[in-house]
Every structure is written in structure tokens, then in C-alpha cells.
Amino acid sequence: MRSDVVKKGIPAAPNRSLLYALGYTREELERPLIGVVCSYNEIVPGHMNLDKIAEAVKAGVRAAGGTPVEFPAIAVCDGIAMGHVGMKYSLVTRDLIADSTEAMAMAHQFDGLVMIPNCDKNVPGLLMAAARVNVPAIFVSGGPMLAGTLNDGRRTCLSHMFEAVGAYYAGKLDEAGVEEYEQNACPTCGSCSGMYTANSMNCLTEAIGMGLGGNGTIPAVYSARLRLAKQAGMKIMELVEKNIRPRDIMTQAAFHNAETVDMALGCSTNTMLHLPAIAHECGIQLSFDMANEISEKTPNLCHLAPAGDTYMEDLDRAGGVYGVMAELAKAGLIDTSLMTCTGKTVAENLAGVVNRDPEVIRPIGNPYSKTGGIAVLKGNLAPDGCVVKQSAVAPEMMRHTGPARVFNSEEEAIKAIYDGKIVAGDVVIIRYEGPKGGPGMREMLNPTSAIAGMGLDREVALITDGRFSGATRGASIGHVSPEAASGGPIGLVEDGDLITIDIPEHTIQWLVSDQVLAVRKAKWSCPEPKIKTGYLARYAKQVSSADKGAILE
């Protein structure tokens, strides 16, 4: 066993003495040591139940003959961090999580790992760590929360909550109306109930083969979630015995499967940051262009919030991720021969799976659209690309030309929106919010929600070198690369410049002459860094562009 180095022989006697100090018996030390990486905390609603998940995992490990050893991972609640300096610290935690988990796993020489994540950066961070350490590993998330219910019976969720703020500033909702959303938008523990980033990544963990069936969709409050955790605890012992490792599962073809499922589900645009970063840890390079290639032949089968009015509990009832994959398999769109953490192939996992609700999971022959949920656009405004969740864009905004309204921070933009200075037809530009310029690449959920809440999402586009929450809808185009702080063209745009967006053609053009561009380039200089000390300053010096996954180089 890998753990023998800290358990066996005279040289390991000091190590054993410290393990005995922890209360472990000789009999427990004779078994495989399984690290249980639990992201429990008391500040993230999606993580407040993970102590129960960890106890279930440990029960499963013990039942299968292993010795579980729990240690923590951090997590940030993006919703609570939204709209202030705290959001600069969200994306950067992905690498902190990966680094710290790698350190713990290598320092203590576990034989296997059970990862218990749930929210936005926690999932990809632990997947990155699993790839790096490359010992047998399995994931079991905390699960999504249930949708909320308003007083009139309408279901609601976090994206509606943010849009309610915009509606208030537009005079469409009073304080009592806002409070009704406050009290009902997030009714249970779990990751927020729509196809936002957390649920997107938990579903893709299942699609790529690192989580058991139901990992992405079983609600947090269902007892089935605890049973799944026990099964994951038992399954890790099989993976250890067979020496099935993360890089055996997370192959190039598996990432292709994950991106295909991404397109069918209509996942968050943040997957375009996280999948390349995880792949990088596996020694695999994913390009932006691959997204469009897959999207062109992958139909969009689901319209979960914010794109539609269905929620994760509905997707679970309809058949979950396996139900979506079974539809895709009918058209030969996924590789069903691949090994997964179940110890079986994708084909074996999908045997007997049926679509139980063709309105939640559209049949392959009757999709919401013939192309996938995400598109990558390129043009002279974003030579290296930018990303839009096209499944959440109104038809009338799929093609749009309008004048730029330029802001150098989220705060400037949100003030202008709330003050009623953005009008129909405008193209809002928010720059110096990229991985380096932010630093930390903040989510622009507040501005996009304000635009939607004011009823302008069918008339106004927003373009940024920052990123978006999975809760964002509308013509919201992020990850503009290169970013402004790296000298990208978005840093040269001025108020009134015309911008043309053509999502079906995957283009984004800035209508300015070469002569004007040359003059502006000569005048441009990078602004002083917004943060000059601490972790964020170090991060800004090392981080790559968004099109490369904002990895540290």
C-alpha cells in the first residue's frame, strides 16, 4: 500500500506513534488509509451539510474495509462574495484548494481519496488536485438545494433574487417584494437550484466519470444523497484495489464527453475556465475552438434556470446526467467505451437508463436548439476569444449592433445601470476585471441581473474581460481575451464605438478604423494594479489569460 511508508517497519515507528496519538488502532492502520477531503463550513449554504456527507462516506469506507481520515478544504460562497472586493477572492481559491489538497495528500501518503465538494471553485479545485496526485479518487458532492416558492405559488431561485434588485431600482418592485424573494429564493442547504456554476461542475464531474450516478442532481436534502455518499465510500475501496486512478478516467475522450454534456445541459460559462484547467493538470490541452466544434453538433436538451423554469430537482427526477447522456448516446455523440469511477464503462452505466420527462430532458430528436448551450466568439475585440451562454440569450439579441458604454470596473457600471444611464441598444463594456486586471476575474452577476431586472436584457448587451455567474442570462459575453490589463483591444474601446455581436456566426467585431486603432494603441498605458500586496498581487503576476483557463504559469 502507498501508506505503508508511514505505517510499516522500524523507520516508520515515529510516524506510527503520531497515528496512535490520533486514536487509531493497529488494526485500523493495517487497512488502506483513505483521505476524506471535506469542504464543510458554516458560511456557504452548499457546504453546511457536508459534515453529514463526510460521516456517510466514512461509514462506507469502514464497511468496505478501509480506514477513513478526514481533512478540510476551503470554499467561498460566490453569492455572498458578489458585488464587492470579496469576489476578487473567489476564482483564486480554485488554485489554493488544489495546492493545499495536493500538499495534504502527498504529505500523508493516503492510498485513496474521497473528495466532498459542492460549490463553484471547490469542485474544479479538487478535480485539479485529484489529477495532480493521481491516486485512486472519487467525488461525491453535497447536492443542489430545492427551488424556492413565492407566496403566489411561483417557483424561484437565486438568479431571480438578483434580478429582483434590478426590478426594485427600475421601480417595478417595492421593498416588500424584494424581501419576499429574500425569504424564499434559497429555501434549503445545497448548491443554488439552477444550472449555475456549482451544479454545472458537479454534473460534469459525473459526465467525465469521476462521480457516481446522481452526483450532480440528487438534492442535498434527500436521503438518497447520504446513500450515495456511503456508496462512494465503499466504491473507493474497489478503485484502490484495482488501482484505477484519476488520469485513467480523465482522458482526452472523457473531456470531450464532458464538453458534450456541457452543451446539452446548457451549463455555466465558467466551465470554459475550469475544464481547461483540470485538463491541464492531466497533461491535456483543451482549446476554445473545441467548444464551438462540439457545440455545432450537440443539441441543447435542457433549459434549467436561468435559461428556463426548470430546476435541478426536476432534472434529477427526469433521469439526471445519465438521462442526458443516454439521449446523446442515441446519436453517437459521446464515447461510451470509457472507464469511470464506478469500475464500469459509460455504456454499462447507461444500461437501462430512460428519460422520464421529455419536457425537462428533451429527446435527441426534439431539442431546444440544434446547437449547444455555449458559444465562443472571436473577432477584433477578442482575438483569442470570448464566451457566451447562448441558450440563455433572447432570440432578438443573437445578433446586435450598438454603441459602447465603457466602464473600468464593475462598480462604475452598476452605478450607471441603477442610475438609469443605460438605454436600449447599448453595449456595456466592463474591463480591467480579468484574471490579471481584477485581479481575480470577478463575476458580473450584479450588472447582468440589474439589466435583466429592469427589463433590458432583450435590448442591451454586456461584454467583459471578467466572467459571469451561471445565474447570468441575456447577451452577456465574458472571458474576453486578451484582457485589457494585458493590452487587449477591449482596453482601447471608447464610448460611442459601435460593437457588432453575431452569436450564430461566432463573431464579435469592433467597428473602428485601423488609423484610429493605431492612435489609441500609441496612447494606451496599463493602469496601476488595483491590488499591490498579498495573495492577489502574487496571483496577478502568475495567472494566464481566460482562454487558457486562468491557470497559474
Image (cartoon, helix red, strand yellow):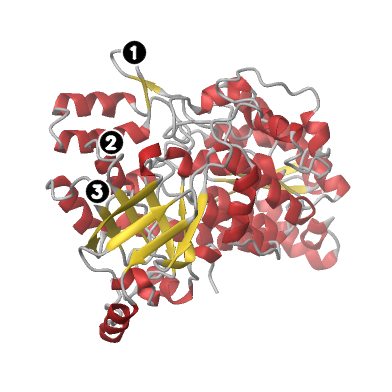
Crowding near the residue tagged with mark 1, few <14, some 14–19, many ≥20 C-alpha atoms within 10 Å: few
Residue at point 63%, 34% (across, down): 215
Instruction: Decide: is 363 above or below 535.
Output: above
- Quick check: can you spot residue 6? yes
Above/below status of 545 relative to 76:
below
State how far apart marks 3 and 1 are (Cα): 34 Å
Which residue is nearer to you in this view: 160 or 138?
A: 160
**Residue drawn at 74 percent across, 43 percent down:** 67
Please give left or right for residue 100 compared with residue 323 in the image.
Answer: left
Instruction: Check residue 503 in the rendering and tell me which mark sits there, or answer none.
Output: none
Residue type highlighted by circle 3: Gly
Name which quarter of the figure residue 54 lies in.
top right
| Residue that numbered label 2 is attached to | 163
Query: What numbered label is drawn on residue 425?
Result: 3
Closer to the chain start, of discs 2 and 1, is 1
Near mark 3 (Cα within 10 A), the count class, few <14, some 14-19 or many ≥20, is: some
Distance in Å between CA atoms under marks 2 and 1: 18 Å
Q: Nearer the viewer, mark 3 or mark 1?
A: 3
| Residue 47 percent across, percent down from the top left | 48, 39
Residue 449, percent from left and from top: 29, 41
**Residue nearest the observer in this picture, 464 or 151:** 464
- Location of the N terminus by quadrant is bottom right
The answer to whether residue 221 shows anywhere in this view is: no
Question: What whole-number distance in Å separates the C-alpha atoms at marks 2 and 3?
Answer: 20 Å
Kindly indicate whether the residue at mark 3 contacts the one at mark 2 (C-beta within 8 angstroms): no
Q: Which residue is mark 1?
A: 153
First in sequence: mark 2 or mark 3?
2
Quarter containing the C terminus: bottom right
Q: Report helix, strand or loop for mark 3.
A: loop
